[in-house]
Amino acid sequence: MELQKAFAEVNLNALSHNLKVVQDRTANKSVLAVVKADAYGHGAIQISNHLIKKGISKLGVAYTFEAIALRESGITAPILVFFDRENMDACFQFNLTPVIFDLATAKRFSSEARRLNKQIPVHIKIDSGMGRIGFPVKKACAEIIKISSLKNIRLEGLMSHFSEADLQDKDYANQQIERFRSIEKELKEKNVSFRFRHMANSAAVLSMPESHFNMVRPGIMLYGYGCCERDNLKPILSLKSSFVFLKTVPAGTSISYGRTFVTKRRSIIGTIPVGYADGYNRKLSNTGEVLVNGRRAPVVGRVCMDTVMIDVTDIRDVDYKSEVVLLGRQGKERITADDIADETGTIAYEVLTSVGPRIQRVYT
């Protein structure tokens, strides 16, 4: 396979390592691997297949179309659909598990399951404090008891989601756990129980063992990012390229749109075929860095839709075969999604999921 001039290299050994961190931190609880948004930009089909081989229990996606793509690729593992309440037919056709967060939707699923003479497993979402979706705490028990009496619906899981488990101050996160436990206890007293109880996202997997219950939902940590260095995670994606043009220019030469960078000396400027259309943030104009021959080289001028210009004047032996690393490690240097996020005022999640479809994924 001939590689494009820019590609994302995904290290499956590092993915295995990160999964092992999850398993070690949670005493081998069941793992629902979150592979929504194309596995955070890493390629959902390939990532899912690898994780299944390593023994994960379930997969989680945001929307039904993501689950259908996994099914059509041949994946048969259970798939939980977090947010989609409209594509009910697909849940039956493709054997998907919906997350239910309102009574009306539960009734619709029950009616359709009865029509098809099928049982459908569901997970019930409680809004314990995230404020996004879910049964409100005050109404949760009464509504869930009503769902438990519906025909052809099997209550498989009870779940909630943290809003700030990644903060050092765990007071609010602990309040969410107590709300969840209180609802679970009240339901159990009413003879309503669940096979799976899950709440722990990556931050909670790493820092809140009391939230692990009997299943956890790691996402970003599978891809190598956690709260801090001591989490022992390995970023699995590197974004690499090479030069499509190298030129030597005199002092006073303007580079890219708006002439925001003008050379102050005779300079060697390289152009690489990655731009903001590929997820390389325009905010990195004149501030970003890449790695070339084991050294850092600055981005100069504005990031374009399809290209970025790099000043390699101070780097020896640069030619068209030189590897350019925009994200990842080269020699003793490395650039992480956290580094880029800090530079652009966002989070690692956005950096990873922004790597566009023009960037070929290569699995090693």
Image (cartoon, rainbow, N blue to C red):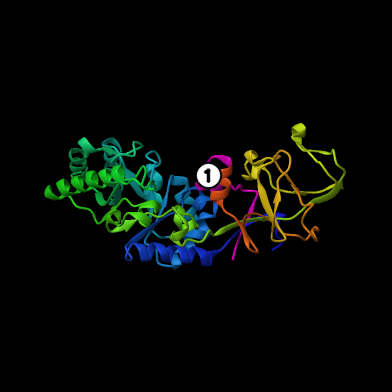
Q: Secondary structure at mark 1?
A: helix
Residue positioned 44% across, 60% down in the render: 230
Region of the chain picked out in magenta, as a range:
344-364
Q: Is residue 348 covered in magenta?
A: yes
Question: Is residue 74 among what the camera can see?
Answer: no
Q: Position of residue 180 (x, y in %)?
A: 24, 46
Q: Position of residue 116 (x, y in %)?
A: 31, 48
Which of 97/151 is in front?
Answer: 97
Q: Is residue 64 covered in magenta?
A: no
- Disc 1 marks which residue? 350
Image quarter in which the C terminus is found: bottom right
Question: Is residue 40 among what the camera can see?
Answer: yes
Q: Is residue 331 left or right of residue 15?
A: right
Q: Position of residue 156 (x, y in %)?
A: 27, 53
Residue positioned 42% across, 66% down in the render: 20
Residue positioned 45% across, 67% down in the render: 53
